[in-house]
Image (spheres, grey):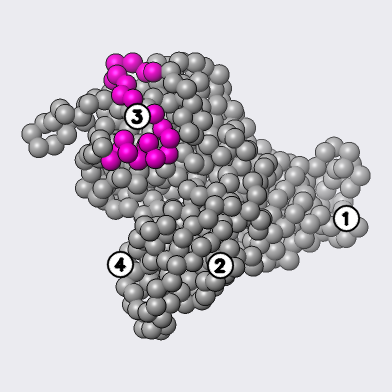
Amino acid sequence: MKRFWQYALIVVLTFGASSAVAALVSKTVIKNKLEEVGLNTTSSSSEGYASLNPNEYGFQNTSMAFDTSRSVGSAPDLIPAAERAVHSVVHIRVQGEQTVSGGFMDPFDFFFGGGDGFSRNSVRPVVGYGSGVIISNDGYIITNNHVVDAMDKIEVTLNDNRVFEAKKIGSDPATDIALLKIEAKDLPTLPFGNSDALRVGEWVLAVGNPFNLTGTVTAGIVSAKARPAGQTQDGDNKIGGFIQTDAAVNAGNSGGALVNARGELVGINTMIYSQTGSYSGYSFAVPINTAAKVVADIKKYGTVQRAVLGIMGSDVNSDLKEKYNLKVNSGAFVADFSEVSAAYAAGMEKGDVITAVDGKAINSFAELQSIIAMKNPGNKVKMTVNRKGETKVLTVTLKNTQGSEGIVKGSTGNKFLGGTLKELPADARRSYGISYGIQVTSVGKGKLAKAGIKEGFIILSINNVAMRKVSDAHRVVNALENVPKGRRTLVLRGFYSGSRIVNIPIDL
């Protein structure tokens, strides 16, 4: 198992946008779970798509799938689910620009210094592809953040070949989820399922546009649940709890639907494990319970209401058990606390093992993450911990990413390596005597802070790519996605007002 996660370090994300530049759940269980969160459970016909009042998530979405009594031998009949899903999955085409460096002299460097004088930046168009899922019949579409990140134009093609220009409402790198909107009505949608109720061995379908082949359906089973994730390029931890399946997924499937045999959306296909860039046996999807909460927050608040415990830790394993004399075999081990920690305030201590949240047993740190991801700042949770063999129950009041318990409003679209960036207006550029550049407006915890970069730093280029827009910075970082760790280096060239130009290296 340890060797598996060593290999997992070279997971290749199935970037639809980056490719151009580079079973059955019981009806009763589903019904009861949906009623718990206030969703309508009235059956809807598989022949049409009902226009409903907004559900708890705020989207006009069909509420329940069709009857699944049909079967082929001992296996479920997946034809109705496939036929319904293809109408609700869209093809996404994105366009942007990439700034590249050529072997020419830069007059700015030649006359004013600060560079090697032998590079000239040029801009070339970039086109990428991916998938998305219609989740509201008035035009809201869910996809992956990496499909649309830093792109200037997003074009959506429906299954009936109608084409719309889409607007990005918001995105969340931590879950790799983005919300789009097209101006259309009476669109077919997939009903939300309950990803918590998925079982290992359950049949699922992956629906998307691999290699630009539209309307493609592949089948497999749920191979595992609550798989952990890595980090975003901003240095933040991704939200774990991925669904692992063996349904074939390739480049272009990103943002597409993972559907159960009832025709319900249970996940958003996000990445594959591969040493080649193509499907190697299994893939990963963001659970729809997590994704739905993310897009609902984006729609309502403009950003995700992320509840945090303020702990750092890992799964319980044999090494930790021996080192800390732990008395349990599974759970989330608490190694340390963040600067502001709700868990610490509630009485948690280093070395504790979290074994349950609100009475629900957890076996891994990824499971803990996925449960907390469904909460909001200010929510109170009962956390069961094992402390040197003694069981304690602590009441934790969750905080937001800013350390308080209130609602956070605004957009995080300009977040970059633990800081935020803004584009310089023309008068500011003229006052500095520069033709391009973006400015660091705030610095929190992350790569920028570790490199010693402070608020006010003006970035002229990153890895010799001119910074004309904030999206240019994201493109440079995304281009390093497939570079092995240890070789992912950024060189930020810039200055503070009144100071000379400097080059600052950052290792990702």
Identified by mark 1, the residue type is Ser
Does residue 187 appear to the left or right of 81 in the view shown?
right
Q: Position of residue 233 (x, y in %)?
A: 57, 54
**Tally of numbered discs:** 4
- For image coordinates 46% across by 41% down, the residue present is 291
Q: Are marks 2 and 1 in contact (CB under 8 Å)?
A: no
Cα distance, mark 4 to mark 1? 51 Å
Tell us which disc is closer to us: 4 or 1: 4
Query: Is 249 within the magenta?
Result: no
Q: Position of residue 222 (x, y in %)?
A: 27, 47
Is any atom of residue 240 visible in this view? no
The residue carrying mark 1 is 497
Q: Position of residue 187 (x, y in %)?
A: 44, 18
The residue carrying mark 4 is 1
Disc with the residue nearer the chain's start (2 vs 1)? 2
Disc with the residue nearer the chain's start (1 vs 3)? 3
State which region is magenta. Answer: 29-50
Disc with the residue nearer the chain's start (3 vs 2)? 3
Does residue 284 appear to the left or right of 100 in the view shown?
left
Kindly identify which numbered label has been placed on residue 96: none
Q: Are marks 3 and 4 in contact (CB under 8 Å)?
A: no
Kindly identify which numbered label has been placed on residue 41: 3
- For image coordinates 49% across by 15% down, the residue present is 185
Local crowd size for mark 1, using a 10 Å CA cut-off: few (<14), some (14–19), many (≥20)? few
Identified by mark 4, the residue type is Met
Identified by mark 2, the residue type is Ala
Work out whether 181 lies above or below 306: above
